[in-house]
Amino acid sequence: MKFTCDQSVLSENLALVNRAVPSRATHPVLTCILVSVEASQDAISLTSFDLSLGVNVTFTANVERGGVAAIPAKLLSEIVSKLPKGEVTLEDDEDSIISLTSSSGTYRVRCMNAEEFPRLPEIVDGTQVTLNPTELRSGLQNTLFAAATDEAKQVLNGVHFAISETILEFASTDGHRLAMVTMASEDVTDVSLNVTVPLKALVEVEKILHKTTNPVRISFSEEQLVLTVNEPNQSRKRITTRTLAGAYPNYHVLIPPTFERKIIVDRRLLLSTIERISVYSTKPTDACKCIISTDAQELILSIDAKETGDCKEAIPAQVSGESLEMAFNIKYLLDILRVATLSELEICVNGALTPVVFKPVGDVTTSFLVMPVQLRS
């Protein structure tokens, strides 16, 4: 095996693949990146796999000899990232040694047995759909934050995808809040899908989507999902992941059909206000008290922290319905306000302890639900 490519190209692709290298591997070869070189196509393939999440990238290079090698991921990535700009040549020999040569010198790395590296799962008889990357990116950006991170919650540790007729839906919940995006899409005609994809895999998918305008092909079965993005010049990025087992909660029933109170507020003003008062928050579970004032047409936000002090701010709002006093987990509010993109936010409320829905004004596709917390006397 011998090929030459630009240092920045190799470093960027290694950084992406390195994200699926396990920190604690069940087998030593999983700490490696599998480098496959196809001489007939001048193509380089890099693969990592933790037995659940797999990442594969393919790009072009100047290939002299084909071959395959399992190279320790951490060492390879660190060496390449620190090499000077310019061409890098990677070559193996008969003693399982890889040599990396650049203008600064030569670095030799001992490899592992490439035959022990497991193959990435493939979906042969599954269903396939091609999505617009902008739609997919929007759905993920507005739902990833609300997925559970507690591994004990299993099926909640991801985003639920549902496709029915021409409707594409994303949803995530950790049991205390819900994020949902529902959009009409011409790309999902005659496709039916209900699958929950792990958060870890989707975080990597979102990073890829930020750098592409090309269609995204998704192949899926009951237990596996493969997402592929074909780029110009024979480049390709592919992520494969297990789906999460179990029935996802019926989140639609959580959203009240009607609301007694509705508040419209400037999102940026609300965000900056809560960021200021959040300096008094000492724990992730700290609550922000919120008084909805109909007479004053404003929201009064405050925190009373015994250890540090207290603070209060009022901001103008369009309030319909009776006044009400309630409280929210301050982190949950910040998460919503940071992912929402439009200038105004509609807050829909019934009671002090019933679900509250936040909707960006002008965006009919996105809703965020948060359960208030009980105020302590």
Image (cartoon, rainbow, N blue to C red):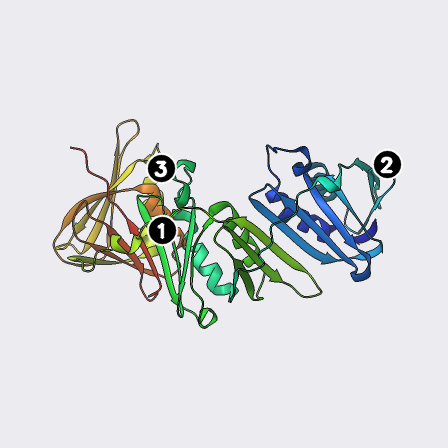
Residue type, mark 1 in image: Ile
Horizontal side of 299 relative to 4 (left or right) equals left
Q: Earlier in the sequence, mark 1 or mark 3?
A: 3
Q: Secondary structure at mark 2?
A: loop
Callout in the foreground (3, 2): 2
* Mark 3 neighbour class, 10 Å CA radius: few under 14, some 14 to 19, many 20 or more: few
User: Which label sits on residue 279?
Assistant: 3
* Mark 2 neighbour class, 10 Å CA radius: few under 14, some 14 to 19, many 20 or more: few
Q: Secondary structure at mark 3?
A: helix
On the question of residue 273 being in view, the answer is no
User: Which label sits on residue 327?
Assistant: none
Which residue corresponds to mark 1?
Answer: 336
User: Which label sits on residue 95?
Assistant: 2
Q: Earlier in the sequence, mark 3 or mark 2?
A: 2
Closest to the observer, 170 or 137: 170
Residue 360: x and y in percent read: 33, 60
Residue 356: x and y in percent read: 24, 51
Asked which quadrant contains residue 108, the reply is top right
- Are the residues at dot 2 and dot 1 in contact (C-beta closer than 8 Å)? no
Note whether 127 is above or below 145 in the view shown.
below
Closest to the observer, 49 or 88: 49
Residue type, mark 2 in image: Asp
Asked which quadrant contains residue 233, the reply is bottom right
* Residue positioned 78% across, 57% down in the render: 61
Residue type, mark 3 in image: Val
Closest to the observer, 348 or 53: 53
